[in-house]
Image (cartoon, rainbow, N blue to C red):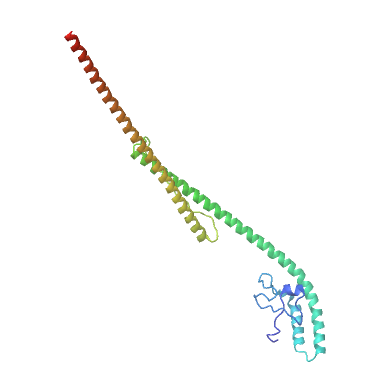
């Protein structure tokens, strides 16, 4: 059999009736035909229909090699007669095949969704653990700073929390991409926490300066009152001395 005739239509074209002896579907290996243009739908005839397929191929060959129109017409009628049972058989088979593919696709999507959920849970758990560690570190640094500035008393010694990271036992696809996004989110969170801690420290410094200014102001006021008392004392003494002189003159 020549290479020209060593092919048959794909299942969708046979089921649709678009494959005829005069206008044929050229299905080749795993490539989609011109009518389907979709690898998923353009399906080769399964081996269980090989006997019927060979009979149709033989009739196509005889049609192509016919010496006159009369022979061609007979070959065409025979071709149509052979195609009818093949089409009916493939209709039932292809309906079941489409259901099977649809079920497989649903299972694939479900498994993918479950993997994504597990990956999101793992990412959230790691993010929360990182946030907790950073909060503890920032709080400890702030406490040490306030103690150093004598804003608070160091009554309780610093408490260090030992954090042991546990390896994640979640199996996910595209783990490199997930880890990259996790690192990016951690860096963003660390930057946000740093800005928050810096703001707290600046606020504490402002309060410390305010207390210092208030203390200086209070001291100046106390010194001013002392000087006023001393001045009033001198004025009173001078008045008393003047009164005594007048008494002596009298």
Which of the two residues, 196 or 98, is positioned nearer the viewer here? 196
Which of the two residues, 130 or 50, is positioned nearer the viewer here? 130
In this view, 110 is above or below 131: below
In this view, 113 is above or below 132: below
Which quadrant of the view contains residue 90? bottom right
Which residue is at 61% across, 58% downward?
111
Judge from the rendering whether residue 120 lies leftward or rightward of residue 15; answer left or right.
Answer: left
Q: Residue furthest bottom?
A: 67
Q: Position of residue 175 (x, y in %)?
A: 52, 60
Judge from the rendering whether residue 7 lies leftward or rightward of residue 198; answer left or right.
Answer: right
The quadrant the C terminus occupies is top left
The quadrant the N terminus occupies is bottom right
Which quadrant of the view contains residue 20? bottom right
Judge from the rendering whether residue 11 lies leftward or rightward of residue 145; answer left or right.
Answer: right
Q: Position of residue 54 (x, y in %)?
A: 74, 81
In this view, 198 is above or below 86: above
In this view, 191 is above or below 15: above
Q: Position of residue 162 (x, y in %)?
A: 42, 46
Which residue is at 55% across, 53% downward?
120
Residue 118 appears in the rendering = yes
Which of the two residues, 27 or 205, is positioned nearer the viewer here? 205
Q: Residue furthest top?
A: 250
Q: Position of residue 155 (x, y in %)?
A: 37, 34
Which residue is at 73% across, 69% downward?
94
Q: Residue furthest left?
A: 249
Residue 165 appears in the rendering = no
Which residue is at 25% across, 23% downward?
231
């Amino acid at each position: 059999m020549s290479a020209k005739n060593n092919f048959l239509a794909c299942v969708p074209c046979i089921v649709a009736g678009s494959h005829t002896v005069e206008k044929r579907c050229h299905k080749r290996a795993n490539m989609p035909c011109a009518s389907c243009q979709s690898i998923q739908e353009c399906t080769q005839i399964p081996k269980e229909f090989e006997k019927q397929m060979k009979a149709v191929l033989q009739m196509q060959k005889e049609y192509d090699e016919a010496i006159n129109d009369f022979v061609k017409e007979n070959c065409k009628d025979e071709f149509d007669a052979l195609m009818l049972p093949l089409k009916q058989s493939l209709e039932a088979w292809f309906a079941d095949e489409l259901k099977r593919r649809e079920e497989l696709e649903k299972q694939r999507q479900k498994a993918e969704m479950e993997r994504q959920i597990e990956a999101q849970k793992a990412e959230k758990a790691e993010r929360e653990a990182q946030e907790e560690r950073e909060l503890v570190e920032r709080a400890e640094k702030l406490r040490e700073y306030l103690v150093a500035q004598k804003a608070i008393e160091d009554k309780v010694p610093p408490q260090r929390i030992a954090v042991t990271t546990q390896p994640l036992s979640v199996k996910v696809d595209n783990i490199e991409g997930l880890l990259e996004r996790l690192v990016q989110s951690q860096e963003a969170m660390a930057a946000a926490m740093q800005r928050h801690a810096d703001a707290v420290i600046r606020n504490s410094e402002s309060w410390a300066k305010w207390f210092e200014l208030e203390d200086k102001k209070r001291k100046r006021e106390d010194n001013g009152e002392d000087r006023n008392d001393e001045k009033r004392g001198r004025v009173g003494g001078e008045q008393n001395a003047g009164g005594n002189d007048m008494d002596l003159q009298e």
